[in-house]
């Protein structure tokens, strides 16, 4: 008697194999925000953060800051247990089919078979199902146990924007920096210790006592006959897009002039400039389409404080006769008063405007 598994049993084997593979658990990404406590010694230093998304000012320490953190955890699946239970049922069904298909043989007195009730198809199906169910059960049970034990285990974790570094600056002290250690237990904390700068202390008398004056804003640029004062911790300035009130040029040139103005200020060591990306992000939160949606003084003050700037800088182009005038105003956010202003006169061509912006930056840096 030949016993062969029917096509339906072979199809069931293939379907089971596909189901087992599809039922495997896998990684799942969880995103959360972790609070980081930032302190400096001495307190009051300006703290900036750097990561893959750029560099931005956070404000004066002590402060708290939220870092977006990503954890990849293993997500288990109930499919293994379902398949294990189903395989036990299939194995039992196969055994029942084998027993039912065995039947019996009726022989005469001479030993010849008179009637055979054995069902070879049923036996073949039963053997295939029993083998399939038994194999799946003994393979699936340990896998189901392992899958359950790994549930919600953290596979890897990291800040969403890569390594996060904090930097602190304070007049009269050397800057300090530290990379956030994400392996430590939460809550996370960063402590930046600034060492006193002996060279800055030695040069303090040159400022004519202004360094100790109570009315001088911490981190501000001191002006007077001696030019710029303490350069160890230049103030942060939010440079807003140059306003073209007379419509003398296009948007691309305005963007280039704004970038040139910020670059010139940094090159002349007059200020540290808040990244334009930070201003755009804050503008987006305020549902403003561009810099030009924030041209009034009140809006710029609020935005400057939101990005932890010390100053704001606004510049305007005005056509006067055949030429153009560029006016620049620096506003001190701490004293809430205009700190300095400058004006330059020149042509209205893109080349003349670039030259005017450079002269304006030079004047603002010298004041």
Image: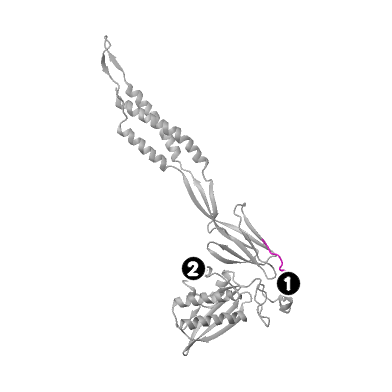
Between 78 and 57, the one lying in front of the other is: 57
Residue designated by label 1: 201
Between 159 and 227, the one lying in front of the other is: 227
Whichever of callouts 1 and 2 sits on the residue coming sooner in the sequence is 1
Circle 1 residues within 10 Å: few <14, some 14–19, many ≥20: some
Q: Which residues are magenta?
A: 192-202
Name the quarter where the N terminus is drawn: top left
Where does residue 75 sit, x and y in percent of width and height? 49, 46
Where does residue 77 sit, x and y in percent of width and height? 46, 43
| Residue 212: in magenta span | no
**Residue 127 quadrant:** top left
Residue 200 visible within the image: yes
Kindly report which numbered mark, 1 or 2, lies closer to the viewer in this rendering. 1
Secondary structure under tag 1 reads helix
Where does residue 204 sit, x and y in percent of width and height? 72, 75
Between 110 and 352, the one lying in front of the other is: 352
**Is 112 located above or below residue 98 in the figure?**
above
User: Marks 1/2: CA distance?
Assistant: 42 Å
Residue designated by label 2: 284
Question: Residue extending furthest bottom?
Answer: 321
Residue located at (45% from left, 39% from top): 80
Name the quarter where the C terminus is drawn: bottom right
Residue located at (57% from left, 69% from top): 307
Secondary structure under tag 2 reads helix
Question: Residue extending furthest top?
Answer: 109
Where does residue 230 sit, x and y in percent of width and height? 67, 74
Residue 88 visible within the image: no
Question: Residue extending furthest left?
Answer: 114
| Residue 200: in magenta span | yes
Specify the label residue 179 is tagged with.
Answer: none
Q: Is residue 211 left or right of residue 162?
A: right
Q: Is residue 159 left or right of residue 200?
A: left
């Amino acid at each position: 008697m030949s016993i062969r598994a029917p096509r339906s049993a072979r199809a069931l084997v293939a379907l089971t194999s596909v189901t087992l593979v599809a039922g495997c658990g896998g990684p799942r990404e969880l995103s959360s925000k972790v609070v980081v406590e930032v302190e400096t010694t001495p307190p009051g230093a300006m703290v900036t953060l750097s990561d893959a998304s750029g560099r931005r000012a956070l404000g004066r320490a002590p402060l708290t800051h939220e870092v977006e953190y990503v954890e990849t955890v293993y997500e288990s699946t109930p499919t293994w247990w379902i398949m294990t239970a189903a395989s036990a049922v299939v194995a039992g069904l196969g055994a029942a089919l084998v027993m039912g298909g065995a039947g019996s043989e009726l022989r005469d007195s001479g030993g010849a078979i008179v009637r055979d009730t054995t069902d070879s198809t049923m036996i073949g199906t039963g053997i295939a199902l029993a083998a399939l169910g038994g194999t799946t059960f003994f393979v699936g049970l340990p896998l189901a146990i392992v899958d359950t034990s790994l549930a919600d285990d953290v596979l890897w974790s990291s800040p969403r924007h890569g390594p996060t570094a904090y930097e602190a600056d304070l007049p009269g002290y050397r800057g300090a920096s530290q990379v956030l250690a994400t392996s430590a237990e939460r809550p996370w904390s960063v402590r930046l210790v600034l060492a006193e700068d002996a060279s800055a202390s030695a040069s303090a008398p040159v400022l004519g006592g202004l360094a100790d004056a109570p009315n001088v804003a911490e981190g501000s640029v001191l002006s007077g006959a001696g030019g710029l004062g303490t350069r160890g911790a230049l103030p942060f300035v939010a440079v807003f897009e140059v306003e073209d009130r007379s419509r003398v040029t296009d948007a691309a040139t305005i963007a280039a002039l704004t970038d040139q103005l910020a670059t010139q200020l940094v090159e002349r060591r007059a200020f540290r400039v808040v990244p334009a990306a930070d201003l755009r992000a804050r503008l987006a939160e305020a549902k403003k389409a561009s810099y030009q949606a924030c041209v009034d003084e009140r809006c710029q003050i609020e935005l400057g404080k939101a990005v932890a700037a010390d100053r704001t800088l606004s510049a305007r182009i005005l056509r006067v006769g055949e030429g153009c005038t560029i006016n620049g105003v620096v506003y001190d956010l701490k004293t809430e008063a205009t700190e300095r202003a400058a004006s330059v006169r020149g042509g209205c061509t893109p080349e003349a405007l670039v030259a005017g912006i450079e002269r304006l930056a030079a004047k603002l840096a010298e004041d």
